[in-house]
Image (tube, helix red, strand yellow):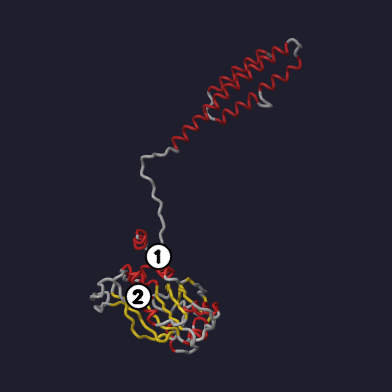
Amino acid sequence: MKERLEELRGEALQELQGVESPQALNDLRVKYLGKKGALTEILRGMGGLSAEERPIIGQVANDVRGAIEAVIEEKAAAFQQAETNNRLLAETIDVTLPGKKLPTGALHPLNKVAQEIEDIFVGLGYSIAEGPEVETDYYNFEALNLPKNHPARDMQDSFYVTEDILMRTHTSPVQVRTMKAKEGMTPVKVICPGKVYRRDDDDATHSFQFNQIEGLVIGKGIRMSDLKGTLLQFVQQMFGAQAQIRLRPSFFPFTEPSAEVDVTCVQCGGHGCRMCKQTGWLEILGCGMVHPRVLEMGGYDPEEVTGFAFGMGVERIALLKYGIDDIRHFYTNDLRFLGQFARM
């Protein structure tokens, strides 16, 4: 049996020398040292040995097992080191290469302008009110002195969901909802930002969907001069201290008197140029004193309080502020266009 063990040792060590993979190494371990391996088969014959031979053969068997296991461990360590070296080579990072720049986002120019407008009016003591984009006919028209079949509806009658529900055509419904929520309490001083929808053909200055910010102030003794002073303060913070405004008589069903507001041309400073058609002025927004009927429907007594309201398109302000010639640039998602505002 001793000779068989020695032969097994030589055979196993010779085979282990030529092993080339971890799988082959494991197969040899099972072949020689497994439960059904060659060493185990030899040791099963120890039952027929005398008491004097068993310790001797047992020691030889342990030496054979130790020798085989030592080579297996050495080979396994070599395979592990080789795998580690290969992974290090494959995963090497060349720190001298330029880094990969991740694209960074930025505010859309319309969001940037909207936030700037909001910041100006919040600084003047206004709060921000919001309302639903899908609105009822009552809040969108009737509560704003626009009864059914009123001719002034023609410009705004647009996207109806049902006969009495539509996509809002302005943010004025939020003003009515604010008045009703106040239950006749004063003062009221809010701006109402949001998207609005109208049946307009898309061109350089119009879109069927655009962003609007409206303002409402209600209290005792509110006058047209307060409105003009507020708008002048806004324009000068938005376009610079040199900017001036003028009010031209106009008509809106929900204000009386009403006015269109012009600002001195941002390009020529009021001297006259192609942008302002040589007039020196650019139209910027509409405004007026809140109509008594609107005050009544909002829960206020027009004999006790007065108010003013104004509304502007965010796109219109952005066009003027940045000197952009086509509103559609804001919606086409051209990164060459939008990327210019990331640096502002």
Instruction: Please report the residue visible at 42 percent of the width from the left and 83 percent of the height from the top.
Output: 289
Is 34 on the left or on the right of 109, as rendered? right
Res. 290 mark: none
The residue nearer to you, when weighing 53 against 156, is 156
Q: In the figure, 92 relative to 231: above or below?
A: above
Q: Residue furthest top?
A: 52
Q: Which residue is mark 1?
A: 112
Where residue 297 sits: x, y (%)? Answer: 52, 85
Give the image location of residue 97, x and y in percent: 36, 42
Label 1 secondary element: helix
The residue that appears at 47% across and 34% down in the rendered structure is 86
Proximity of marks 2 and 1: CB atoms separated by less than 8 Å? no
Q: Quadrant of residue 241?
A: bottom left
Quarter occupied by the C terminus? bottom left
Question: Label 1 is placed on what type of residue?
Answer: Lys
- Quadrant of the rendered image containing residue 299: bottom right
Between marks 2 and 1 in the image, the one whose residue lies nearer the viewer: 2
User: Is residue 3 visible in the rendered structure shown here?
Assistant: yes
- Label 2 sits on a secondary structure element that is helix
Residue ID for mark 2: 232
